[in-house]
Amino acid sequence: MKRALITGITGQDGSYLAEFLLEKGYEVHGIIRRTSVLNTQRIDHIYQDQHGKGVMLFLYYGDMVDSSSISRLMAKINPAEIYNLAAQSHVAVSFEIPEYTAQVDALGTLRLLEAIKNLGIETRFYQASTSELYGKACKVPQNENTPFYPRSPYAVAKLYSYWIVKNYREAYGMYAVNGILFNHESPRRGKHFVTRKISRAAARIAKGQQKKLYLGNLNAKRDWGYARDYVEMMWMMLQQEKPEDYIVASGETHTVREFAELAFKYVGIDLEWSGKGIEEKGIDKQTGEIIIQVDPRYFRPTEVDILIGDSSKAKEKLGWEPKLTFNELVKIMVESDLRIIE
Ligand code: NDP
Ligand code: GDR
């Protein structure tokens, strides 16, 4: 039986990965943060009473900014695989709290790698790298050889992690890899990311619980995939003979505007657009009501205009391909938000 450690187990990806590894027969250990309100909703369905027999999921308090808790837990758990998913993962928020973002997203990774090195743990390490590293596009689609140009404190912190993982692999022969994942969403996506903000608003507006949706840049283009499909690749990357970095992407790009049009279509609202720039509005064709308005508060000081990933290396070497289409993704997110209301 293999033992895996997941940092960020309470997040979107952490919860899908924990399910995936438990199904594969792993003993799963997760680090959670102390919060004043319990925040384990995404993993409550797989939580097991720690007093029972055959427990396979274990949770511990710790924090990526606290080296002593990290070293202590690594020594105690001695995991065969480590998935470092913990992060201050909101790009816009990283402009508000850049120092904390660097502490967690950059130095947090270093703390884990140092603990592995100093304790002499035999393990395989997965780092949650991101398409945000590409930032200002010099070429699309982006592949493993495309130069980086990060555009936010979040992306700069993740750039540090990308390189420190590569450095520890080369310097100490560690099995440590970067999964460069493009945006991936699901019904479990945090409510402040644009896809979930839209799917939730579509459901709430259709049910009369909300009047309007305020968004920022409607023209940003993203390569959106399904989180459940992507966690499989995290695992596959740790099962290879040689540690290598891979892109994980759908290969399609869509604007925020397209995502919104499709989401509202699912709840029976056909949108048409009028005005330009911050005056632009999404209007219900049937009733003439304003449904979407632009709020410049959601603009970012520097934006990533277009992301589209080329995951042919993952397909050719590991036989991985995404399963869910863009339309299906929007549909399952809106349906889930409708169910939550009902
Ligand atoms: P979430 O924001 O949903 O989850 C982040 C997790 O990190 C949560 O469990 C959170 O805990 C935990 N965390 C945050 N700060 C700390 C800290 N100081 N100490 C310990 N744990 C902490 O992110 P996702 O699941 O969407 O993403 C997983 C990882 O993948 C992240 O590193 C993200 O940056 C990266 N990524 C995500 C992509 C995506 O499209 N989803 C694409 C590419 C990379 P809590 O629940 O307490 O907040
Ligand atoms: P992103 O995701 O920044 O790509 O990072 P997000 O959903 O926050 O933004 C996507 C695009 O939508 C535009 N946008 C808005 N975004 C938010 N959050 N709220 C709005 O109201 C809004 N209106 C327009 C943004 O400007 C942006 O262009 C995600 C995170 O999961 C990161 O952790 C991860 O590394 C990357 O994806 C890949």
Image (cartoon, rainbow, N blue to C red):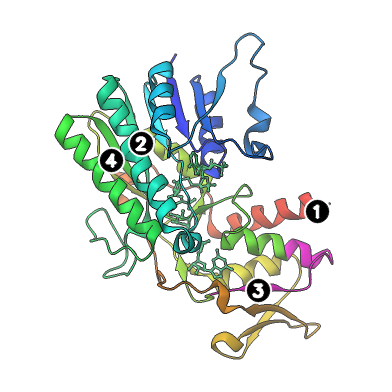
Q: Going 63% across and 8% down the picture, which residue do you hit?
A: 53
Residue extent of the magenta highlight: 202-216
As shown in the figure, which amino acid type bears the numbered disc 1?
Ile
As shown in the figure, which amino acid type bears the numbered disc 3?
Tyr
Q: Is residue 24 above or below residue 200?
A: above
Q: Going 49% across and 76% down the picture, which residue do you hit?
A: 219
Give the residue number, with chain letter if any, for mark 3. 214
Estimate the spatial distance between the alpha carbons at disc 2 and disc 3, rounded to whole Å.
36 Å
**Label located before the other in sequence (4 or 3):** 3
Estimate the spatial distance between the alpha carbons at disc 1 and disc 2, rounded to whole Å.
36 Å
Give the residue number, with chain letter if any, for mark 1. 341
Q: Residues within 10 Å of mark 2 (few under 14, many from 20)?
A: many
Quadrant of res 298: bottom right
Q: Going 66% across and 65% down the picture, which residue do you hit?
A: 263
| Mark seen at residue 317 | 4
Q: In terms of secondary structure, where does tag 3 sit?
A: strand
Q: Is residue 118 above or below residue 262?
A: above
As shown in the figure, which amino acid type bears the numbered disc 2?
Tyr
- In the rendering, at what x and y percent does residue 38 appear? 68, 37
| Mark seen at residue 325 | none
Give the residue number, with chain letter if any, for mark 2. 126
- In the rendering, at what x and y percent does residue 246 appear? 31, 45
Q: Is mark 3 within 8 Å of ligand 2?
A: yes
As shown in the figure, which amino acid type bears the numbered disc 4?
Lys
